Image (spheres, rainbow, N blue to C red):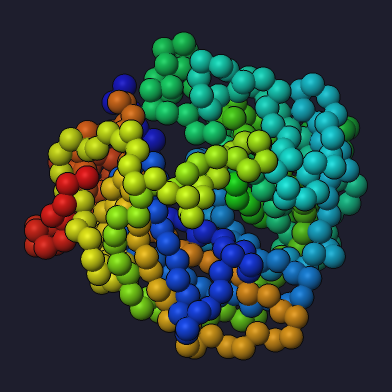
């Protein structure tokens, strides 16, 4: 009690080529708050990454726990150079490795969950074995792991603590073969955070030493969809798009369900409810509806605060985008900076919008001697609406 995990305000979100297009010289995005949370959005940057045919682009991303923060930089993968594992082994033995070849919502997951603790599983180990690895003499190599996690609530972590248990993020190790000792990459390193996304882990040094087996050990409810090794290169053509406009409005709540009967559920933008059984923050103000462009241009501790059911409609200027070369693809990277806070009874300061977070805080909630910025004028001007 009274101990809180450190916050991680940065994330680069990959938007696949087929998910976004230019219309009338702009790129439009909708950012919604469909859950019982408050979202503090400080900065949004959109970058277009053009890459050759038969290649894919990903941000170098994961949620760091004890591992180093990822760079978030885009990397390009030649599809023909991907190497998939030939075996995957958990504590129950060998599993169906074919499930890891495509991003198709066919997952390899925990062998046993802890029913009373959402987000926890029995201690689990996954070992991904490769027959070969890329040649790292001239370029870097990364391990790509697409998956998702079921996050536990604060109250669940407290209950686990009472039961003398704690959540452990994946500890990652490598070895050459079954006769070799395991070498540690990182204890409680990190994972692909939240909804399905791809974790990109630089394993150049390990592969140079002969790594062919990679092990992940955790009791976090974690599901793997696709895993592969590949050499990575920097993109040749990147274009940052200027923010043109941003409007905060009431957007409602997208319906959440599974189209194929598998977890996780997905949100359906075209099917929205005007209200939910939602418990609003008990005190504090969120950002008023209307134009909010200037709050999103840079990370400056003045943010757009979204309450439940809010929608942030943003437009980026696409006039300077180069023409795509024949056969090339364009992947989008949304670079975000901000925080969110849910209404779990044991979440820090969960009852109110404040205290507002800021970049130089030592943790949340901020300490009295943390150098908080002067935001009185900002709050009076922008944050005038109840959640």
- Classify 360 as above or below 119: below
Q: Is residue 272 left or right of residue 106?
A: left
Q: How many circles with numbers are drawn on the protein?
A: 0
Quarter of the image for the C terminus: give it: top left
Pick the front one: 246 or 231: 246
Question: At 77% from the left edge and 59% from the top edge, which residue is drawn?
Answer: 230
* Residue at far top of view: 163
Question: At 84% from the left edge and 45% from the top edge, which residue is drawn?
Answer: 85
Q: Looking at the image, can residue 84 be seen?
A: yes
Q: Indicate the position of residue 173 as horizontal and vertical percent values.
A: 70, 38
Q: Indicate the position of residue 246 as horizontal and vertical percent values.
A: 32, 69
Question: At 77% from the left edge and 75% from the top edge, which residue is drawn?
Answer: 53
Q: Looking at the image, can residue 338 be seen?
A: no
Pick the front one: 331 or 364: 331
- Classify 114 as above or below 185: above
* Residue 347 found in image quarter: top left
């Amino acid at each position: 009690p009274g101990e809180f995990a450190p916050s991680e305000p940065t994330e680069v979100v990959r938007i696949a080529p087929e998910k976004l297009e230019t219309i009338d010289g702009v790129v439009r995005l909708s950012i919604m708050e469909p859950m019982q949370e408050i979202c503090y959005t400080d900065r949004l940057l959109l970058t277009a990454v053009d890459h050759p045919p038969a290649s894919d682009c990903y941000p170098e991303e994961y949620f760091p726990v004890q591992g180093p923060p990822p760079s978030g930089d885009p990397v390009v993968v030649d599809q023909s150079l991907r190497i998939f594992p030939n075996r995957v082994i958990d504590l129950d033995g060998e599993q169906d490795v074919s499930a890891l070849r495509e991003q198709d919502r066919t997952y390899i997951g925990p062998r046993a969950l802890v029913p009373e603790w959402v987000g926890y599983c029995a201690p689990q180990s996954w070992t991904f074995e490769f027959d070969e690895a890329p040649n790292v003499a001239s370029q870097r190599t990364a391990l790509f792991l697409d998956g998702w996690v079921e996050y536990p609530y604060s109250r669940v972590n407290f209950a686990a603590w009472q039961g003398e248990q704690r959540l452990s993020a994946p500890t990652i190790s490598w070895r050459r073969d079954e006769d070799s000792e395991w070498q540690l990459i990182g204890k409680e390193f990190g994972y692909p955070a939240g909804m399905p996304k791809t974790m990109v882990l630089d394993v150049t040094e390990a592969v140079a030493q002969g790594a062919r087996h990679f092990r992940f050990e955790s009791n976090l409810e974690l599901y793997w969809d696709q895993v592969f090794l590949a050499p990575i290169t920097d993109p040749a053509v990147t274009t940052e798009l200027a923010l043109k406009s941003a409007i905060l409005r009431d957007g409602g709540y997208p319906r959440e369900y599974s189209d194929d009967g598998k977890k996780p559920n997905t949100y359906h933008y075209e099917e929205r409810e005007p209200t939910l059984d939602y418990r609003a923050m008990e005190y504090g103000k969120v950002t008023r509806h209307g134009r909010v462009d200037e709050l999103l241009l840079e990370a400056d501790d003045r943010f757009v605060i979204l309450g439940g059911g809010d929608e942030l409609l943003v437009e980026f200027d696409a006039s300077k985008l180069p023409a795509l070369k024949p056969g090339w693809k364009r992947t989008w990277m949304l670079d975000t900076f901000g925080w969110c806070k849910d209404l779990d009874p044991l979440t820090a300061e969960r009852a109110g919008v404040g205290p507002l977070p800021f970049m130089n805080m030592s943790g949340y909630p901020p300490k009295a001697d943390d150098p908080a910025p002067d935001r009185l004028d900002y709050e009076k001007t922008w944050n005038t609406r109840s959640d």
